[in-house]
Image: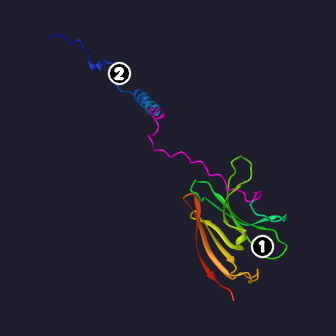
Amino acid sequence: MQPSAVPDLADLAHTHARPAHWLATATATAAVVALAGLIQPGPAGAGPAPAAPLPAPAPEAAGVDYPLDCGGVARKVAKRASGDLDGDGNPETVAVVHCEAGSGTPPHAVYVLTRAREKGAPARVVATLVEPGLHQNVAELSVRDGAVHATLLGYSNPDVPLCCPDEKEQVSWRWQGGAFVRAGQADAYGA
């Protein structure tokens, strides 16, 4: 019988497992796993969506050039409400404005404001919802669900004293087809 060209496995030093061998193997395996974790590609679309840009703040009602002739008397912003009326993601401001009267009940005008085109410039009027010539007053104003809601007080005829409006109307305006469309219901009340 001829001797084998392959040495006996029992004679090889590396075939005897020693604790240092197992420790070195475990350390090398851990290093490979850690390295693989560091160089993995990112998730394919599974992460959070990028943050949407924040909307601009609502326009300020003060300092606006309102189309209200007060004959040299100051204009006063009596009420304001803000919200996105045209669906562009940025809020508009609705302002109730009247002439500053020493006494009596001056009629109100209702304007929609948007941000100025130039940075730092005052807001600009883009729509008039209630003309001052209608001799109405706004008792309540809000912006909800993309619409302007208001309670208007008015007069059935010129003989009704300005202190005591005898008509009340719940109205709303919604942006449709490039304009504000009004809807409402009038109620007579009083004496």
Near-viewer residue (94 or 43): 94
Looking at the rendered image, the disc whose residue lies closer to the viewer, 2 or 1, is 1
Which secondary structure, mark 2? helix
Q: Nearer the viewer, residue 58 or 117?
A: 117
Q: Position of residue 122 (x, y in %)?
A: 74, 53
The residue that disc 1 covers is 106
- Spatial CA distance of label 2 from label 1 is 103 Å
Q: Pick whichever, 34 or 133, lies toward us.
A: 133
Decide: few, some or many residues near mark 1? Use Cα within 10 Å; few <14, some 14-19, many ≥20.
some
Q: Which residue is mark 2?
A: 14
Q: Whole-percent x and y of residue 131? A: 70, 67
Image quadrant holding the C terminus, namely bottom right
The colouring scheme, among rainbow, by chain, secondary structure or one colour, is: rainbow
Q: Residue furthest front?
A: 158
Query: Residue 179: image x %, image y %?
Result: 59, 60
Residue at point 26%, 17% (across, down) = 8
* Residue at x 64%, y 68% (from the top left corner): 142
Q: Give the image location of residue 127, x and y in percent.
A: 66, 60
Indicate left or right for 76 with 56 as reference: right
Kindly report the secondary structure that dominates the magenta region of the rendered protein. Answer: loop
Q: Quadrant of the N terminus?
A: top left
Quarter holding residue 75 = bottom right
Q: Is 58 in the magenta? A: yes
- What are the residue bounds of the magenta stretch? 36-65
Q: Quadrant of residue 170?
A: bottom right
